[in-house]
């Protein structure tokens, strides 16, 4: 079902008189899969009592109508629409339970890739239990919860329930939010209740019914943090263009583009409203939109295939980086250009034109790696027409091999290679400018503060540090996907919650940012007064929408020199830069927040002489246990 | 420090010029322990900057003043009152952190049994972190969080802060609740925030300052679910009796009695206000109250020493009970008397006086154990002057040995012993009355429904079952203690949360019931129509006070026959009966509930042909994952 070069688009079939010819039909029409009822809609089943209790015969079509290959790749099974798992009437409920069990078992028997389960209310604890009970068993298929994007107005309600009726007028009148989403009728809450009952099961997904009247942007964005597997477009959503073909409004196109980014499959439901063009026209239009997506940005292209993939943060002090890691990051089109500008400006400021031929500045590159900052500094000096002497200090002996080669072949005598940890080095002279690139995804998390403090003894009093400051930033996020990814990281050798007490470097993708990022810890250099790099701060966020908080995304920005800055904060992102992903601090238990409420989190940066680590703790809306107390699950080694 | 035959009562010392003579003094005065500052109050310590930064000398008295035996049994260490771990001022905060660390380390060095930590605000995340950090280390002492019972009015505030001031008038004017507890100023919230930050650490306790004006009963009761270790009584709380001795008001005496039940230690603070009687008069009065407590009730006496002790529920179908288990329960003074009454009444109703000599009723005791119900039935028949023939059916061959002996020695020919499982027995005739005692702490949890359904084939159409019905009851509870007890039950052979997905039989003690119990599942016998013993129900509770829900207490009541009932529900408890404790269904994560809010929980009784189990799930105020899905952590074997 996965489409790479074209969009995967399915067809919702309500009535399937002959299953093999219907799928053939849909298939001919260019669709990739079809959703169809699992059992015969008119084969009444009564499990407890009633005339049909002892009815003989097959409740569904035989599996022989399709090949097993087709069942497992082309068919999404639809549950019977009459099931009421949470009915107050015990007979209805128990009969529904028995029927659900039978249908799910048949779906597993057929090996369909997914089952479509309509959700119509917040009252779904027993449905959730029955689905979880089934998922804990031996089946493998996904469970797609079919839910509207926002509470249906009466109009769209009718359309969904009975899409053969003609669409009536007035659909373009814009309803205000309170009309669209009456209190207690937010379908996201239905979904959230169900998935919480199911403990965020990883095989749960959302089949989102796209609504005619789109909800506010914050509601659309909230869906983007959910495990969207399928987007259901009613044919009634489509307008007709001049040539008579079905097309979507600009607003709907925007939604479709967001869905494409998440590799969501599309599904067309409802009768063909453009019969002269054939049902295929809807699929072709979707594919047209897919082919005309905006190209990926630098970091998106770089991260392709690694979306939401959790990495443990680098520990460059404790471990040595590999050659290919250096090679990748040296290619960043933004970072070294900015460093070059910063060194250029610093040299200009430090050495007036009148002294440019007499005064030589000592530039120390601390953590030179394979030399990109040395090259940038030399270029900057040439460009600024200033004399510099460069020390390239690098602790990794393997990288130092490259440095010696580059000195020999390119840099010449003005560059001195020092193979040493900057914290141990006895420098022969003091520095005018130090240049370093020790920042991690969260700024200070690769121990830049501790390293640069170690260089303090060989800095001139008015030494310039590039970067001169950096600040970490934090934003609460919702992501069913990431919560499950963290759960998979469980490590038998560590304490039972260690994987939830570890930050991860990750390219955030199937994620909703619940509030703008706010600044957390700032470090400035040179750091003459206090060598205390421990920090404690609590920050507060105001939630836009009701949501689940699964953790915090961390970013940073840094002032290299004066107005030359780099940032990974989405609001101020340095376009084109790909050197850093984000960092993700998970929460052991999702924290439920209501719209407009405050979320307060406390962050600590603690240390011993050997280690540095973060601890974090939510205190509003409800106090949660401290994560990673005393660095029990994760520390950064000095 | 633990007192069994007399109350353990300590003395709070504010200023201790000579520690060895002061403790001697207190000891002479009959106190069991003393609370005193850990460090010299006038030895100013500045860790970051200031004149005192490099001050030489000892910050505390030497450990040599007392023997290590005395330090570890007589002294509760008080932290310095000036510590402000959550100050907005960074210097104050970091200085407080350093001082706290020093004092806690010294307390650990001295091996004092507990440290007293004053808590004055909801803003205590950093204090919590520092305490947790310390408790995760190598210390063993308890951490007593000193917190007022309710928000101090200005009056009591002054008294606590400076108890040498004379108590002014007006203290008897009753303040209404809103005066006592201004919004956001509930000290229980301070404590709750702190302990949640500390993840309910098991060495955290409460040292409760008893207030002059007592809060509402619901607030007092809420404290009784907390880990109370010490109750602090200011000398200003005491009235003076006719003979000039200090005494407490009736209302305060009620509180003291509740505290005694929880083995809370007492502490007297403030200057002696009855100097002619000596400070010892306060301790003597406390001991007087202790000696004059109400005697324990039947079940309290029976459970002495087993309070809050978690047992796995009996599985009498899968396992055979031991002789001593039978022996203990046969002694219940209420249960068998009630059964006898029930059989008496049933025989009277079934056989009119006119037929008493001609009609013999077949009474089957199903699960006869060592015979108490056989004896009760025979006595009832004699008392009713009705003829009966008794079958004593028992599956446990070891208990059957006793039955054969009793038939031989006491019961005679009217009793037939059947060593068989009632579900497999081919009865030679049908029963008029069946008598059974298959109920567990939660009613149906020892599979009485399944057993009695198995007896259905050999019941006459109008057979009477004793019991004729039973209903489980549920009530949400708060208990820091039980939450920690469950945590200790972790079993390496089971899934990581299995111990939180298992119900426990327990005598509830250090527990607050947050709402009255409501009925859950009802079973009636004989059960002719439906043999479906699965159940599903959601129940709702309205919270009286803001609280943490740690789980649900389960009880049951049963109608033996007509108006003859037994109940373990606290509201209708069968006084004197001790055969059943309660059952406790834990929650993996405590659920925070606000005052007047609703708590909704779903309970399922599910089964396969081999097993029965419960599942449970909270859905309001927030949806939590289902516990024990598919019986993965706990089932009851058939």
Image (tube, coloured by chain):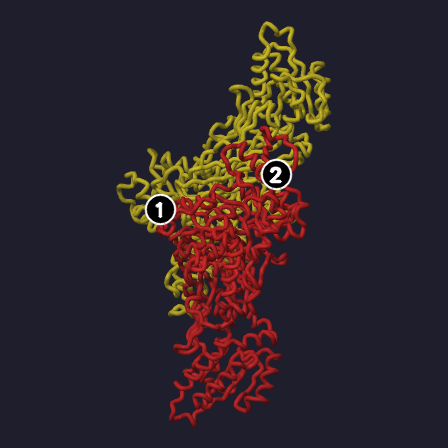
Chain colours: A red, B yellow
- For the residues marked 1 and 2, what is the alpha-carbon distance in whole angstroms? 40 Å
The percent position of residue A132, horizontal first and vertical second, equals 58, 45
Chain name for mark 1: B
Number of numbered discs: 2
Q: Is residue A610 above or below residue A240?
A: below
Quarter holding residue A474: bottom left
Residue visible at 47% across and 64% down in the picture? A554
Using the image, tell me which numbered label, if any, was put on residue A70: none
Instruction: Please rate how many residues cluster around mark 1, counting C-alpha atoms within 10 Å: few if below 14, some from 14 to 19, many from 20.
Output: many
* Residue under disc 1 on the same chain as residue under disc 2: yes
**Furthest residue to the front?**
A276
Using the image, tell me which numbered label, if any, was put on residue B312: 2
Q: Quadrant of the C terminus of chain B?
A: top right
Quarter holding residue A41: top right
The percent position of residue A452, horizontal first and vertical second, equals 49, 76
Residue B64 vs residue A44, the one in the foreground: A44
Instruction: Tell me the SS state at disc 2.
Output: loop
Residue B522 vs residue B364, the one in the foreground: B522
The percent position of residue B349, horizontal first and vertical second, equals 56, 12
Residue A503 vs residue A432, the one in the foreground: A503
Cβ atoms under marks 1 and 2 closer than 8 Å:
no
Residue at mark 1: B151
């Amino acid at each position: 079902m996965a489409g790479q070069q074209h969009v995967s688009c399915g067809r919702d079939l309500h009535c399937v008189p002959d299953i093999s010819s219907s799928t053939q039909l849909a298939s001919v029409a260019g669709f990739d899969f079809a959703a169809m009822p699992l059992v015969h809609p008119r084969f009444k089943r009564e499990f407890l009592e009633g005339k049909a209790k002892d009815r003989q015969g097959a409740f569904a079509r035989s599996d022989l109508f399709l090949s097993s290959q087709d069942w497992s790749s082309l068919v999404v099974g639809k549950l019977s629409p009459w099931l009421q798992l949470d009915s107050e009437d015990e007979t209805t409920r128990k009969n529904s339970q028995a029927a659900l069990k039978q249908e799910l078992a048949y779906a597993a028997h057929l090996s369909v890739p997914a089952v479509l389960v309509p959700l119509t209310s917040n009252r779904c604890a027993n449905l959730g239990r029955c689905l979880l009970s089934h998922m804990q068993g031996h089946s493998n298929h996904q469970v797609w919860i079919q839910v509207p994007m926002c509470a249906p107005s009466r109009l769209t309600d009718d359309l969904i329930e009975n899409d053969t009726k003609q669409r009536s007028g007035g659909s373009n009148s814009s309803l205000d939010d309170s009309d669209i989403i009456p209190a207690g009728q937010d379908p996201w809450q239905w979904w959230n209740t169900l998935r919480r009952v199911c403990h965020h099961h990883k095989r749960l997904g959302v089949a989102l019914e796209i609504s005619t009247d789109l909800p506010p942007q914050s509601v659309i964005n909230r869906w983007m943090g959910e495990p969207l597997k399928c987007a259901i477009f009613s044919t009634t959503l489509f307008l007709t263009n001049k040539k008579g073909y079905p097309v979507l409004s600009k607003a709907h196109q925007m939604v479709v583009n967001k869905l494409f980014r998440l590799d969501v499959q599309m599904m067309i439901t409802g009768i063909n409203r453009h019969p002269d063009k054939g049902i295929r026209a809807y699929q072709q239009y979707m594919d047209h939109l897919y082919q005309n997506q905006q190209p990926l940005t630098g970091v998106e292209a770089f991260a392709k295939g690694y979306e939401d993939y959790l990495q443990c943060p680098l520990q460059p002090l404790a471990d040595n980086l590999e050659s290919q890691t250096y090679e990748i990051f040296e290619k960043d089109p933004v970072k070294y250009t900015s460093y070059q500008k910063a060194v250029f400006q610093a040299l200009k400021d430090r050495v007036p034109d009148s002294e440019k031929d007499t005064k030589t500045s000592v530039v120390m590159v601390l953590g030179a790696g394979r030399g990109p900052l040395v090259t940038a500094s030399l270029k900057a000096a040439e460009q600024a027409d200033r004399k510099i002497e460069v020390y390239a200090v690098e602790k990794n002996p393997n990288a130092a091999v490259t440095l010696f080669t580059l000195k020999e072949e390119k840099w010449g005598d003005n560059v001195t290679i020092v193979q040493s940890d900057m914290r141990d080095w006895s420098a022969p002279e003091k520095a005018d400018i130090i240049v370093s690139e020790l920042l991690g995804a969260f700024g200070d998390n690769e121990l830049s503060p501790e390293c640069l403090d170690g260089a303090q003894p060989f800095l001139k009093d008015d030494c310039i540090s590039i970067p001169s400051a950096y600040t970490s930033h934090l934003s609460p996020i919702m992501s069913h996907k990431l919560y499950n990814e963290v759960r998979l990281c469980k490590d038998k050798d560590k304490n039972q919650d260690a994987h939830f007490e570890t930050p991860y470097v990750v390219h955030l993708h199937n994620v909703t940012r619940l509030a703008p990022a706010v600044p957390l810890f700032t470090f400035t250099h040179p750091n003459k007064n206090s060598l205390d790099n421990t920090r404690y701060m609590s920050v507060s966020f105001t939630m836009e929408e009701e949501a689940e908080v699964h953790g915090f995304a961390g970013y940073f920005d840094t002032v290299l020199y004066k107005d030359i800055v780099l940032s990974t904060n989405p609001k101020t992102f340095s376009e084109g830069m790909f050197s850093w992903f984000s960092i993700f601090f998970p929460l052991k238990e999702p924290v439920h927040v209501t719209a407009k409420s405050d979320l307060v989190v406390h962050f600590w940066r603690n240390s011993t002489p050997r280690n540095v680590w973060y601890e974090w703790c939510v205190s509003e809306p409800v106090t949660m246990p401290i994560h990673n107390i005393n660095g029990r699950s994760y520390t950064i080694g000095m």
